[in-house]
Image: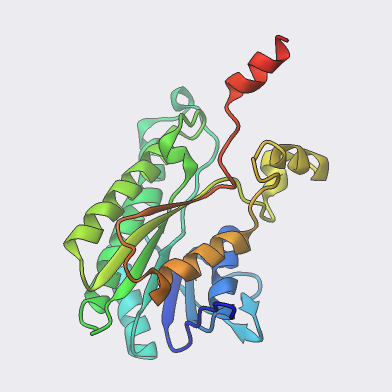
């Protein structure tokens, strides 16, 4: 018998859920039956839809604690509950450390670490008053555990996010589960900016053991699992969704010398 995950009746918030990986997460949650509210500073050009259903969008600046608190209060008031928060919003421009002022690097940390903390605190105030609690999912990055030249502050922030999630999982148990989902390279509408044309994307994909970049839906499927009762005993964990990681460079170097 096939195992399906049905999130019907649950309410999920996906920060930055209007494009790229965030939109993929939103679509997969919609397909699983959840009501989904997305948020970002600016409204998307078109709403995110899947399975004949549409995600709701509400604008909010995640760097403004008062606005974030008001946002989650509105979600609770309008939808009656909050079951899932996916802290997906984040990102960074490519900038070597010596090429940017400390203030620029601090803004990257603010977006990728402080903003998810702010959102989680506000979501917890809603979830802890519910008998069923809730699930918070941090979208981390493989950059948290490897050198990240050109995105060092981003990698440091994502490392901090993973540690933050583990502490939250202890402090907020047993009502609220907190986990980190750790994607590798994901193919989105912006992939050409990083990897070039289709041949370039395919070449980069061949460096991944599973032979391709992740699709946003791959990340979304993992979020649906962590949000569901199938993951009821999983908290404080880091789930790698990176296709097997990266082939160690020394193996290719060794082969080239023979």
Residue 65 to residue 95: above or below: below
Image spot of residue 225 (x, y percent): 47, 69
Q: Quadrant of the N terminus?
A: bottom right
Image spot of residue 112 (x, y percent): 40, 49
Residue 142 to residue 57: above or below: above
Scheme by which the image is coloured: rainbow
Front one among 63 and 186: 186
Tell me if residue 228 can be seen: no
Residue under the image location 59 percent in, 78 percent down:
2
Residue under the image location 27 percent in, 53 percent down:
166
Count all numbered tags in the image, as a single digit: 0
Image spot of residue 243 (x, y percent): 59, 47
Q: Quadrant of residue 77?
A: bottom left
Q: Quadrant of the C terminus?
A: top right
Q: Residue furthest left?
A: 171
Residue under the image location 25 percent in, 65 percent down:
121
Residue under the image location 35 percent in, 75 percent down:
71
């Amino acid at each position: 018998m096939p195992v399906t995950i049905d999130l019907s009746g649950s309410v999920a918030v996906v920060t930055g859920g209007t494009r790229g990986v965030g939109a993929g997460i939103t679509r997969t949650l919609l397909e699983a039956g959840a009501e989904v509210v997305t948020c970002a500073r600016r409204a998307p050009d078109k709403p995110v839809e899947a399975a004949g259903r549409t995600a709701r969008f509400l604008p909010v600046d995640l760097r403004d604690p008062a606005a974030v608190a008001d946002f989650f209060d509105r979600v609770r008031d309008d939808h009656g509950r909050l079951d899932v928060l996916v802290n997906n919003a984040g990102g960074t421009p490519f900038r070597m450390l010596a090429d940017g002022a400390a203030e620029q690097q601090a803004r990257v940390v603010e977006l990728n670490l402080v903003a998810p903390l702010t959102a989680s605190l506000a979501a917890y105030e809603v979830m802890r008053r519910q008998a069923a609690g809730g699930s918070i999912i941090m979208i981390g990055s493989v950059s948290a555990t490897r050198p990240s030249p050109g995105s060092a502050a981003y990698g440091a922030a994502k490392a901090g996010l993973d540690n933050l999630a583990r502490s939250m999982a202890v402090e907020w148990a047993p009502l609220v589960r907190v986990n980190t989902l750790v994607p590798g390279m994901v193919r989105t509408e912006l992939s050409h900016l990083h990897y070039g044309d289709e041949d370039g994307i395919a070449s980069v994909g061949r460096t991944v053991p599973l032979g391709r970049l992740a699709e946003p839906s791959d990340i979304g499927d993992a979020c649906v699992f962590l949000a569901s009762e199938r993951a009821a005993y999983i908290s404080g964990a880091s789930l790698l969704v990176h296709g097997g990681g990266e082939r160690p460079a020394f193996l290719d170097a060794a082969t080239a010398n023979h």
